[in-house]
Image (tube, helix red, strand yellow):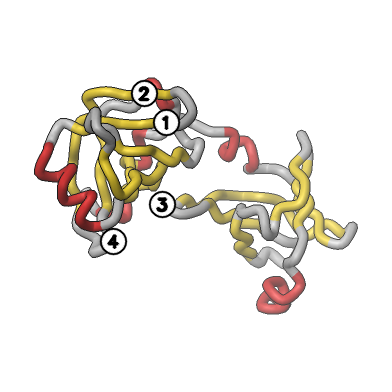
Amino acid sequence: MQISDLVAIGTLGNSIDEKGFFSFHDLGKIDFEKLNNVFLIFTDHRVRYVSIIDKAQKKRKKLKIDDKEIAMETVKMGGAEIALPYWELPQTDQEKLVGKSIFFQKKILGNVIDLIKSNKQTTLIISNEKDQEIMIPYVEYYIDTVTDDAIIIKNAKSLLEIYQ
């Protein structure tokens, strides 16, 4: 497995509470209750595999990991990203984006033919009428509205100039 196979699903805080829990900031990609074994990615790109031995969810989500040395290392490094291999992530609604028409400034740009998923974001691959492949990041800055049939994008003028 390569680090490029890992997809960030959240971050651990930089401190441990009196019961041994880290705060967990969830990116909404997984079911928190089903989270068991994860990879921690530190800012220096070292990766550690840990098991989650306890969870709490009141005001905030919290996790406790099984390895005290790695827990202390996480504190020392100021927190860590939590990641899973992409093949362990549940199928999301993003797969339903393939085939949708893309509109920009009330004109059809093309259709989504594929997705590129990385640990940070998903990128739409759009085929236009010239059979060019246009890549648009699937992030709030570019995505205005998603309907059953179409995706309306925004803020893409300078990005689309590359393809003219």
Tell whether label 2 touches label 1 (CB within 8 Å): yes
Q: Residue at x 68, y 72 (%)?
A: 159
The CA span between labels 4 and 3 is: 14 Å
Answer few, some or many: residues within 10 Å of disc 4's Cα (few below 14, many 20 plus, some between 14 and 19).
Answer: few
Asked whether 69 or 121 is in front, the reply is 69
Answer few, some or many: residues within 10 Å of disc 2's Cα (few below 14, many 20 plus, some between 14 and 19).
Answer: some
Asked whether 44 or 86 is in front, the reply is 44
Instruction: Name the residue type under label 2.
Output: Ala
Which-is-in-front pick, marks 4 and 2? 2
Residue at far front of view: 18
Image quadrant in which you'd find residue 66: top left
**Residue 58, position in %: x, y?**
45, 23
Instruction: Name the residue type under label 1.
Output: Lys
Q: Is residue 24 left or right of residue 16?
A: right
User: In the rendered structure, which disc, 1 or 2, sits on the residue that comes first in sequence?
Assistant: 2
Instruction: Name the residue type under label 3.
Output: Asn
Answer few, some or many: residues within 10 Å of disc 1's Cα (few below 14, many 20 plus, some between 14 and 19).
Answer: some
